[in-house]
Image (tube, rainbow, N blue to C red):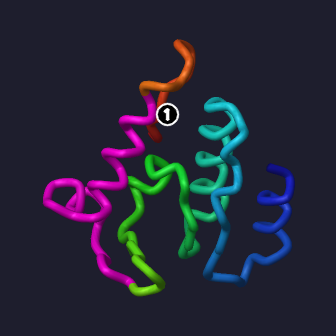
Amino acid sequence: MKLLVGMSTYFPILSYVIYTDVRLSIDNETDKLLQRTIREEFRHHTIISVAHRLHTILDFDKVAVMDKGVVVEFEDPKVLLQKNSLFKDLYDSFRMKQDGLGANESIPVLG
């Protein structure tokens, strides 16, 4: 968290932020805090994220879905969830894995 805040003050002229979703082992509350910090501290930047937790990018303007190194979908994630898409298949699969989470864990919702 300190790294992100530090980066936003150290690199105020950068217009892009690139990060990878390497937080798979953190708890949901920390994940929510991290997501909120990214959105607040870098709200005037373009955020490029390699996401494993697909719920963390549902509020993005666009997502690029790649298959074998080729972009096969590039659209608003809400639009992709409304039609037959690879993104929807991945997201549905992710949601189904939620059933394996503990009683106090759930897919956090941004907002």
Nearer the observer, 73 or 38 = 73
Q: Where, by quadrant of the figure, is residue 14 drawn?
A: bottom right
Query: Start and end of the magenta stretch?
Result: 71-98
The reply, left or right, for residue 96 in relation to residue 15 is left
SS assignment for the magenta stretch, majority:
helix
Give the quadrant of the C terminus: top left
Identify the amino acid type marked 1: Pro
* Residue identified by numbered label 1: 108
Disc 1 element: loop
Percent across and percent down for residue 61 are 36, 67
Percent across and percent down for residue 81 are 23, 55
Q: Which residue lies furthest to the bottom in this view?
A: 70
The reply, left or right, for residue 25 in relation to residue 85 is right
Nearer the observer, 61 or 5 = 61
Q: Which residue lies furthest to the front in this view?
A: 68
Nearer the observer, 12 or 37 = 37
Percent across and percent down for residue 109 are 44, 36
Q: Which residue is drawn at 54% across and 60% down?
A: 51
Q: How crowded is mark 1: few (under 14 residues within 10 Å), some or many (20 or more)?
A: few
Q: Is residue 79 above or below residue 1?
A: below
Q: Residue at x 42, y 25 (%)?
A: 99
Query: Residue 32 magenta-drawn?
Result: no
Percent across and percent down for residue 83 are 14, 59
The reply, left or right, for residue 9 in relation to residue 90 is right
